[in-house]
C-alpha cells in the first residue's frame, strides 16, 4: 500500500525536530452541494529543523516516531520518487 503524501503550511516550529503542518482540503457538502474547506493539523518530523512558519511543505506517512508524530518531512522530490520506484519493482 503506497504511503500518503500531503501538502500544507507550517504553522508551528517550536518543538525540537518537530513541525506542525496545517493541511486544508475541499469537500462537497452532502446537502448543499457546495465546496467547503476542512483542515487538520499534523505533527511531522523535521530532522534538521530547517522549516519555518509560513513555508509550504510536503509530508509523507511513516512509522510512529512518538505519541503524535506519524509523518515526516519530504526533503525534495527524490524521497517520493525513490519510494514509488521501490513499489513498482
Image (spheres, rainbow, N blue to C red):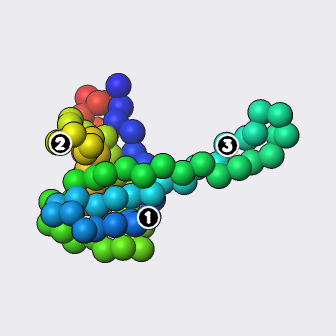
Quarter assignment of residue 86: top left
Q: Are marks 2 and 3 in contact (CB under 8 Å)?
A: no
**Mark 2 secondary-structure assignment:** loop
Q: On the picture, is 87 further left or further right than 9?
A: left
Q: Earlier in the sequence, mark 3 or mark 1?
A: 1
Q: Earlier in the sequence, mark 1 or mark 2?
A: 1
Q: Are marks 3 and 1 in contact (CB under 8 Å)?
A: no
> Residue at 25% across / 45% down in the picture?
69
Quarter assignment of residue 74: bottom left
Residue 66 x, y percent position in the rendering: 17, 42
Where's the C terminus, which quadrant? top left
> Residue at 42% across / 52% down in the picture?
41
Name the mark on residue 9.
Answer: 1
The residue to which callout 2 is attached is 66
Where's the N terminus, which quadrant? top left
Residue 63 x, y percent position in the rendering: 21, 35
The residue to which callout 3 is attached is 27
Cα distance, mark 2 to mark 3?
Answer: 30 Å
Q: How many residues crowd around disc 2 within 10 Å: few (fewer than 14), some, or many (20 or more)? A: few
Q: Earlier in the sequence, mark 2 or mark 3?
A: 3
Q: Does residue 77 appear in the picture of this structure? A: no
Q: Is residue 55 above or below residue 40?
A: below
**Mark 3 secondary-structure assignment:** strand
Residue 42 x, y percent position in the rendering: 37, 50
Amino acid at each position: 500500500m503506497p504511503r500518503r503524501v500531503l501538502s500544507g503550511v507550517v504553522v508551528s516550529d517550536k518543538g525540537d525536530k518537530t513541525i506542525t503542518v496545517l493541511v486544508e482540503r475541499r469537500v462537497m457538502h452532502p446537502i448543499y452541494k457546495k465546496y467547503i474547506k476542512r483542515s487538520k493539523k499534523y505533527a511531522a518530523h523535521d530532522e534538521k529543523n530547517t522549516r519555518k512558519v509560513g513555508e509550504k511543505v510536503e509530508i509523507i506517512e511513516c512509522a510512529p516516531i512518538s505519541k503524535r508524530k506519524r509523518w515526516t518531512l519530504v526533503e525534495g522530490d527524490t524521497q517520493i520518487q525513490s519510494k514509488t520506484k521501490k513499489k513498482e519493482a
